[in-house]
């Protein structure tokens, strides 16, 4: 009885529309925020140098300006990394079990796209193979078909 509950929960989890959208979009958004934070580090450092050279403005130490934005940058990169790993595994399993990918090399091509272009491959797989399909593919994790 307990195995049935686990089986049903995992199958419903991989077919959850909201989770699929979150795992496809959030890694890209976090990556873009990390890039903006990276440029924010340099902006705050140059702004701090400008104020320390005697120009008008609030003076704070260069170390404070650097570390404040560096902590945000590191946090965003780590979150992007961990969510990206979860998203990567989730969509590889989805592509392996997707019943719509039955043509000759569709499954192999999508898995290779996810592996080699990671975040963008995941986003395009979600957009083309899940979001735009009507009806959406229902993936059964515990079937023997691959």
Image (cartoon, helix red, strand yellow):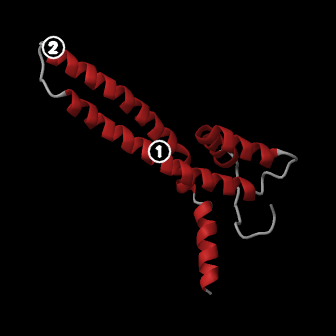
Residue 41 position within the rendered picture, expressed as x and y whole percent measured from the top left: 32, 28
Pick the quarter of the image with the C terminus.
Answer: bottom right
Q: What residue is disc 1 on?
A: 80
Tell me: 22 left or right of 126: left
Specify few, some or many for label 1: CA neighbours under 10 Å numbering under 14, 14-19, or 20 or more: many
Q: What residue is disc 2 on?
A: 53
**From what the image shows, is residue 112 above or below residue 65?**
below
Residue 30 position within the rendered picture, expressed as x and y whole percent measured from the top left: 45, 41
Tell me: 139 left or right of 50: right
Outermost residue, front direction?
63
Q: CA distance from mark 1 to mark 2?
A: 37 Å
* SS type, badge 2: loop
Residue 3's image quarter? bottom right
Q: Give the residue drawn at x 70%, y 50%.
A: 134
Residue 71 position within the rendered picture, expressed as x and y whole percent measured from the top left: 31, 41
Tell me: 121 left or right of 35: right
Residue 4's image quarter? bottom right
Precedes in sequence: disc 1 or disc 2? 2
Residue 21 visible in the shown view: no
């Amino acid at each position: 009885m307990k195995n049935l509950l686990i089986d049903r929960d995992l199958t419903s989890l991989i077919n959850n529309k909201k989770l699929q959208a979150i795992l496809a979009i959030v890694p890209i958004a976090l990556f873009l925020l990390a890039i903006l934070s990276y440029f924010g580090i340099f902006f705050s450092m140059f702004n701090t140098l400008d104020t320390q050279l005697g120009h008008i403005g609030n003076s704070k130490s260069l170390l404070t300006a650097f570390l404040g934005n560096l902590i945000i940058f590191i946090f965003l990169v780590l979150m992007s990394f961990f969510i990206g790993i979860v998203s990567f595994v989730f969509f590889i399993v989805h592509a392996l079990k997707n019943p719509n990918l039955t043509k000759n090399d569709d499954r192999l091509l999508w898995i290779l796209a996810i592996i080699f272009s990671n975040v963008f491959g995941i986003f395009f797989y979600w957009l083309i193979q899940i979001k735009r399909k009507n009806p959406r593919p229902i993936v059964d994790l515990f079937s023997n078909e691959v």
